[in-house]
Image (cartoon, grey):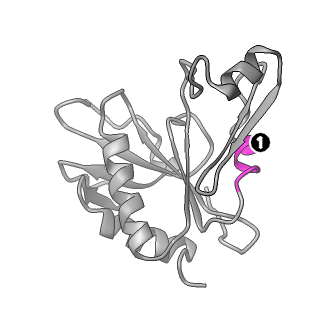
Amino acid sequence: MQIHSTRSQIPVISIVGGKSNSGKTTLLEKIIREAKQRGWRVATLKHDVHGFEMDQPGKDTWRHAQAGADVVVISSPHKLAILESVSGDQPLDEVLARIQGVDVIFTEGYKHGNKPKIEVFRSAVHQELFSKPEDLIAIASDITFNNGIPCFGLDDARGICDLIEAKYGVGLV
């Protein structure tokens, strides 16, 4: 599984874990902060199998959706949000195709997706790696793995970003 980083193709890296509460979000926050310190433009995509609600009942955009709008957009000088009603889970590549103008995209929660993965493994929570070794570009863990896959500590966002920079050329434009 390889991504060739070019200006037209944005590297996509999935942060995964075998179970909920494995530390995916915590690690991703650290990676995002490190990436931003390096000047990277970063997008994240979170998959939520349970569904989510961003709109506040009674607010104008909520009222627009309740009235039947299929797409509701809210824009301010600092943020833009697009809420679109869909009939089912959207394919990862279709959602990713909507993201432009960034250096790297991190996904969280797409452990069955076809993108390169960094697996978060905490020995107190996990018994074995969830992902197949050929799908992993790295492991972030509180223990060391000797399986040929780069292994980083759970706090080593700098090392992980160094790997991403070397492997995909992110930040080297």
Q: How many marks?
A: 1
Q: Residue at x 83, y 16 (%)?
A: 68
Q: Quadrant of the C terminus?
A: bottom right
31 shown above or below 53: below
Q: Is residue 91 left or right of residue 112?
A: right
Q: Is residue 145 left or right of residue 59?
A: left
Task: Write the start and end of the magenta stretch as one range.
Answer: 93-99
| Image coordinates for residue 97, horizontal then vertical, percent | 76, 50
Q: 171 above or below 131? A: below
Taking 25 as reference, is 72 left or right? right
Residue drawn where x is 36% and y is 41% of the image? 24
Residue sitting nearer the eye, 37 or 113:
37
Q: Give left or right: position of 82 versus 166.
A: right
Viewer-nearest residue: 92 or 137:
92
Which residue is at a point 40% across and 34% down the rendered structure image? Answer: 130
Identified at 25% across, 30% down, the residue is: 127
> Is 62 located above or below residue 113 in the figure?
above
- Residue 95 in the image: above or below residue 84: below
| Disc 1: CA contacts within 10 A as few (<14), some (14-19) or many (>=20) | few
The answer to whether residue 149 shows anywhere in this view is no
Q: Position of residue 62 (x, y in %)?
A: 67, 22
Q: Secondary structure at mark 1?
A: helix
Quarter of the image containing the N terminus? bottom right
**Could you say which quadrant of the image residue 78 lies in?**
bottom right
The magenta stretch spans residue 69? no
Residue 96 is inside the magenta segment: yes
Give percent across and percent down for residue 101: 69, 65
Q: Amino acid at mark 1?
A: Glu
Foreground pick, 14 / 36 = 36
Does residue 78 appear in this view?
yes
Q: How far from the left and from the top, in percent, is residue 88?
A: 74, 20
Task: Report the residue marked by disc 1.
Answer: 94
